[in-house]
Amino acid sequence: MHRHLSAIIAAAAALMCGEAMACTSLIATPGATAEGSSMVTYAADSHTLYGALYKQDAADHAPGAMRNVVEWDTGKLLGQIPEVVHTYSTIGNMNEHGLTISESTWGGRDELAGSGLIDYGSLIYITLQRAKTAREAIKVMTDLVNTYGYASSGESFSIADPGEVWIMELIGKGKSDKGAVWVARRVPDGYICGHANHSRIHKFPLKDKETLYSPDVISFARKQGYFDGKDKDFDFSRAYAVTDIGAVRGCDARVWSFFRKYTSPDEMDVYQPWILLAEGEPLPLWVKPSRKLTAHDLKWMMRDHFEGTVLDMTQDIGAGPYDCPYRWRPMTYTVDGSEYTHERAIATQQTGFSFVSDMNNNRPEVMKGILWFGVDDANTCVYVPVFNSATAVPRSLDEATADLLTLSWDSMFWVNNYVANQAYNRYSQMITDIRRVQDGLETAMTGAVADIAGKVASMDKTTATATLNSLTDYWAEKTTADYKQLGDYLLVKYLDGNIKKEADGKFSRTADGMPVSPVFGGYNERYFRSIVEDAGERLKVGDAKQ
């Protein structure tokens, strides 16, 4: 890492550790998936976010009715806007029509931070209440910020319906102009895409029905002094974002890892100069995967820590004695006057909630959208199926059950933290036990969803909706109970640095009923070597003959 880049690494790290969410969203188009689904993922990463499933009911509104606009990150009331005649129901980041919207914040030029009425979170949830399709959503979103002003910084959005997926990037015009500049591109069918806290749209075709943009996206950049070339050479990301080592190493690297896993390593490793040093050609906006993906693939991609790449977080001494792919904040640190950075992977400890949205018109209308929803760290969470027709939230996922400062064993978020935070300390030893329970639950749920699809097709809407609500509730509560039991099991099995022996699913006892002597798991060789290198002769055992 070049030392002169440390300041900009720190700037990017500040974004990742600040109040704005630092999130990841991955995209797969229908032609890139095994069942012809549109898929979008999202991880809402924030150190102050409690993981819960949010629900808004459909409603009819009288003339003159107003809607409060509450800032997503702070809970501050920004103002009010007029309601529309009818609003659709939403569950999480999906609405009753299967439309899904996710985001990642990239900040951009400081002077362009908006001062309007609509923040990025409100923009998502208001739009979900008002749009049926991805193209409608783009129109609603851009109309909202043009009418009421944009209150956030630079943002990327994944906008998907069962037929197509778009990536849109938007940034305000500063405090003197309430509007925004933006560009939206339809991801070509058969391709995958993604964004992770850095603007991903560079040059784009100016005459293409699959590319939309604000009329002044180029002229405003010229006016501000961000661009002075020919229109055909305009680069949205270069003009409005801040491209530095932090933006690519801490952000684009997450998308690179996704692309690398589902294309070929050789094809993606040519972009290592961009990922490591912000040099060379930028990462492509989208790539064609080597095979068609499933929801299972995307769930596991959300659990990525760069395993198998040059950035693999289990391969340096920072992983500690148990190969732990996590690093506590702050993101940067100083040793002997030089500044260094931790890697920032897709899976991270401070996730509030994450999801994989699977949208497909070939399923019954009440389940055309499946939101595989999890809370806490995506690596250790269990993704529970939630349907576009949902009319209720399970108690374990209800925001009224607990909060970030109130532990509750009825809360899936807290139970998942119980499991994950034990694993962070003994990762290589505990993760196999966690995977056993996690895989068992997710495999069973996938089977249950496949089975129920054939049954609800013959039901009336009311019965079908109630049936799907019951399915979600059952698996949410079972997951919570099973993970509480898993957490208890981990505590007992790995107590005091030991590993208890087991037989026939029970901890082993002697014939007299006493606990069998445990395994002393110790540490990995790399950690032992680091102790020897640090302590030298002081810890060396002398020759017994002396």
Image (cartoon, helix red, strand yellow):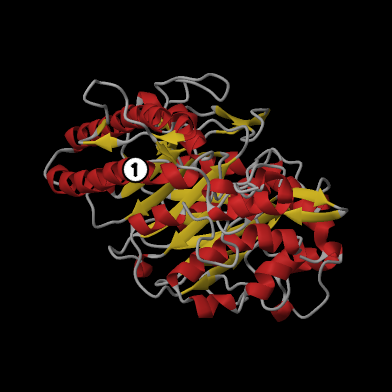
> In the image, what residue occupies the spot 50% across and 68% down?
259
Where in the figure is residue 301, as x and y percent of width and height?
Answer: 45, 57
Vertical arrangement, residue 470 with respect to residue 368, above or below? above
- Can residue 154 be seen in the rendering of this structure? yes
Look at label 1 and name its amino acid: Gln
> In the image, what residue occupies the spot 48% across and 39% down?
423
Residue annotated with mark 1: 438
Depth check: give the residue in front, 154 or 443. Answer: 443
- Few, some or many C-alpha atoms within 10 Å of disc 1 (few <14, some 14-19, many ≥20)? many
Depth check: give the residue in front, 450 or 529. Answer: 529
Left or right of 111? Residue 540 is left
Left or right of 333? Residue 506 is left
- Can residue 173 be seen in the rendering of this structure? no
Left or right of 329? Residue 421 is left
Q: What kind of element bears circle 1?
A: helix
Location of residue 170 (image quadrant): bottom right
Where in the figure is residue 312, as x and y percent of width and height?
Answer: 56, 61
Where in the figure is residue 208, as x and y percent of width and height?
Answer: 55, 76
Where in the figure is residue 153, as x and y percent of width and height?
Answer: 71, 48
* Residue occupying the far front of the picture: 545
Vertical arrangement, residue 404 with respect to residue 297, above or below? above
Left or right of 182? Residue 510 is left
> In the image, what residue occupies the spot 54% across and 38% down?
425
Location of residue 341 (image quadrant): bottom right
